[in-house]
Image (cartoon, helix red, strand yellow):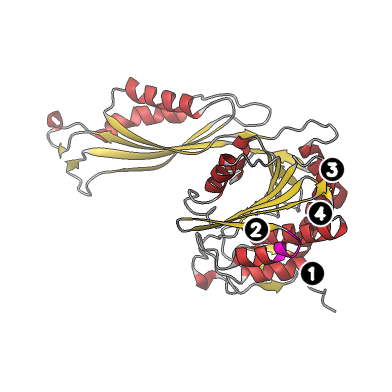
Amino acid sequence: MPKPTSNVIKLAIDLLSRPSVTPEDAGCQQLIKERLAKLGFINETMIFEDTTNLWSRRNGGLEADDIVFCFAGHTDVVPPGNLELWNTPPFEPTIIDGMLYGRGTADMKGSLAAMIVATERFVNDYPSYKGAITYLITSDEEGPFINGTTRVIDTLEARNEKITYCIVGEPSSTNTVGDIIKNGRRGSISAEIDIKGKQGHVAYPEHVENPIHLAMPALAELSQNHWDNGNDYFPATSFQLSNINSGTGATNVVPGHLTALCNLRYSTELTDQIIVEQVESILNKHQLTYDIKWTFNGKPFITELNNEKGDFLTSVTQAVTSVTGTPPVLSTSGGTSDGRFIAPTGAKVIELGPCNATIHQVNESVSCDDLDKLCDIYYACLKEVLL
């Protein structure tokens, strides 16, 4: 006899059926608002340009009203890619052998469903609690990320509305749900470097300045530079060239410029200003003529484990352990998330979600049992922090 479909899976299927390719929301937030409103949440929709955002809050009525617990996430998903490679239609969620398939199952509509059902359980069980439960949901996490969480945070900061603790539902787990908690992320800074030369005929090198030849020593030094040693929470800073483009398409023409794209994932041992100064110092050392365009994607952040009663990360760790039976491992590996916009306000931020093995892939999937267990974990987190 098949296992009955849980409330978490039913809600996940409803969300997954909506083709919310970034920055489209496709009605996902309306569904979330309706569920939260029934619990007494006050919903506030914030629309910035092409992006729909939701800020929702329910006060608990007990002392310590300054505690603001936030579930943060996104309703947008990446495009499905080649539809012929999908075994089932990406926006027709399908359960096969206990796995839920569809675009966004792991990243991150499954987490949203688990959060909402956990909140429903908690509020029904404990209508009064310390502080407030809030939701910060955006439809612009997978895209340019300029009109989403960062704009909501700017709005909250302008009216001095703070978040104390935040769980971002990004898929943090590796092998089993809850095995990894991301308690921080490296900073990310990108550069587009346009190195100038002088175009001309390859047969007359005395009349040209080859930007490829000029650039190679500087790019080699940047790639081999020792930026820092990292620390207890972060690995050493990493510099990576992601693209080099030059040439006219002809074999007998020296090009006039070279464009190099690079990115640094950096630890709390550095600042973006130090990185800018060091990169430009190396370029200047090689006497290059260049233009450089910097993109600041996010600063590093860390939520430390204090092992004290009432400490947020300690509480979340205990909640995970109570459900899975195994203490989670703390990690700062991987890319960035919207946590980078929330942490600078002073909030303690962690990422906790399902397994990430298939995110952004065709046939994205997550275990139904994992989503049910994730709901239990979120419920346990609410109890640990707010009771």
Residue 136 magenta-drawn?
A: no
Q: CA distance from mark 1 to mark 2?
A: 26 Å
The residues tagged by marks 1 and 4 sit, at their Cα atoms, a distance apart of 15 Å
| Disc 1 secondary structure class | loop
What x and y, as percent, mark residue 118?
Answer: 78, 58
Q: In this figure, which residue is indicated by the disc labeled 4?
A: 379
Does residue 358 appear in this view? no
Q: Under tag 3, what secondary structure?
A: helix
In front of the other: label 1 or label 4?
4
**Could you say which quadrant of the image residue 221 lies in?**
top left
Which residue is identified by label 1? 6
Q: Which residues are magenta?
A: 35-40
**Which of 124/263 is in front?**
124
CA separation in Å, label 4 and label 2: 21 Å
In the rendered image, the vertical position of residue 293 relative to residue 37, given as above or below: above
- The earlier-in-sequence mark between 1 and 4 is 1
